[in-house]
Amino acid sequence: MKKINTHSRKNFFKKIFIKICRILGYEIIDQSNFYVPTQEKSLNSNLNVQGKKSITLPLGEVKISRKVENLTVIFRSCTNVNMLTQNKKRLFEKEKSEYTFRSLNSIITSLKLAQSNSPKIKFNIIIVDYNSKSEDLDQMKKQLKKSNFENSIVSLNLNEFVAGINKTNSKNEEVTKNQMSNMANIHKSLLIAKKQCKDLIYFVEDDYLHQIDAISEMLSVYERVSSQINKELILCPADYPYLYTKLDSTNIFLGSNKHWRRVNETLCTFLTSSKIIEKYWEKFVSMCIFENYPFEKPLHDIYEIEYCLSPIPSLALHFTNINSIFGLSPNLDWKKIWDENGNY
């Protein structure tokens, strides 16, 4: 009697079924072997389809209505100033340039992973530099060249902005030269963003070291959460210690690999959209004209209206003094992240 190969027949129909599901945009989960056959990935892999859907088990998928197409990183550098508002040394007690080079390296490394995960997104790096040494600029140029991303370096001319800065701050004290250069650098970065950027902009200072998945996670959560709430967002990559000194109510969102919470305060490193910049242009620019206390108060005013989210645990470390509540995020291996970015 002739045997019928039922196993081959089952495999044939299974393959046809998987193809049909792919065409229709459905996903199949084989929980017996921890596998997603429609994507040919394990369940613990990134199952998102950039620009189309965000998948988190067991909650299922979120259809992406807010697709990210471009990301411009605007990196504000100044290797000649160790600390903006204090004289304490940073963790590891290196020259400021070392933090700048490692920060830039961490961003480039994170961008490369993001490009691999989201090849349809266009990435660009712009450095706005104030008064760094020529050899430090040469090193940054070398890093940019190796990155293979579209890039440029803009030298800040302080004289363009200094006349428009109020010389007395909200404490009725004289604004320092370092603070004026910081305000001018932010102002220049905002002008570049307004003129050149059509989608997402990541404003980042030169003492933030990023985990390798930082950019990928931010892009993923931007698409997911923005699509869920039908609003543009502000994302802060750092889980600052000072956020734990208050009893604030919050909202919790789910990203690809992190939980994200709504926060009401950040420093001046954040990712947002050109629409947010346009909508609150006067508020952003006011931070560059008058020194508030806290300095970021205009940002905090925006966060009263718009959603600003911060990851738990952190995606980036602000390398300040070990005792600063505005610096090192909790529950991370700081030394590991520092060492990982030493080969620039």
Image (tube, rainbow, N blue to C red):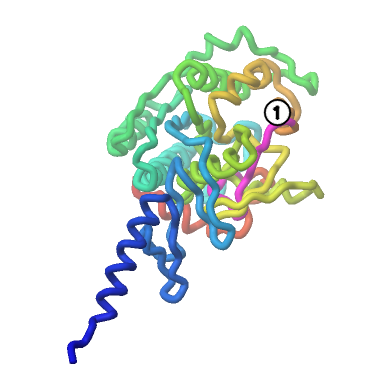
Does residue 121 appear anywhere in the picture?
Answer: yes
Specify whether residue 260 is painted magenta.
no
Vertical relation: 197 (above or below) 230 = above
Left or right? Give the position of 323 relative to 192.
Answer: right
Tell which of 150 and 204 is nearer to you: 150
Tell which of 269 and 309 is nearer to you: 309
Residue located farthest toward the front when viewing the structure as drawn: 1
Q: Position of residue 242 (x, y in %)?
A: 71, 46
Q: Residue at x 63, y 33 (%)?
A: 231
Tell which of 323 and 29 is nearer to you: 29
Q: Which residues fall within the magenta stretch?
A: 305-321
Left or right? Give the position of 320 relative to 171.
Answer: left
Q: Position of residue 123 (x, y in %)?
A: 38, 33
Q: Residues within 10 Å of mark 1 (few under 14, many from 20)?
A: some
Determine whether the residue tagged by mark 1 lies in a helix, strand or loop.
Answer: helix
Q: Specify the amino acid type for callout 1.
A: Ile
Q: Residue at x 36, y 33 (%)?
A: 140
Tell which of 237 and 144 is nearer to you: 237
Q: Quarter-wise, where is residue 230 in the image? A: top right
Specify whether residue 308 is painted magenta.
yes
Q: Quarter-wise, where is residue 169 in the image? A: top right
Q: Quadrant of the N terminus?
A: bottom left
Q: Residue at x 63, y 9 (%)?
A: 164
Residue located farthest toward the top when viewing the structure as drawn: 163
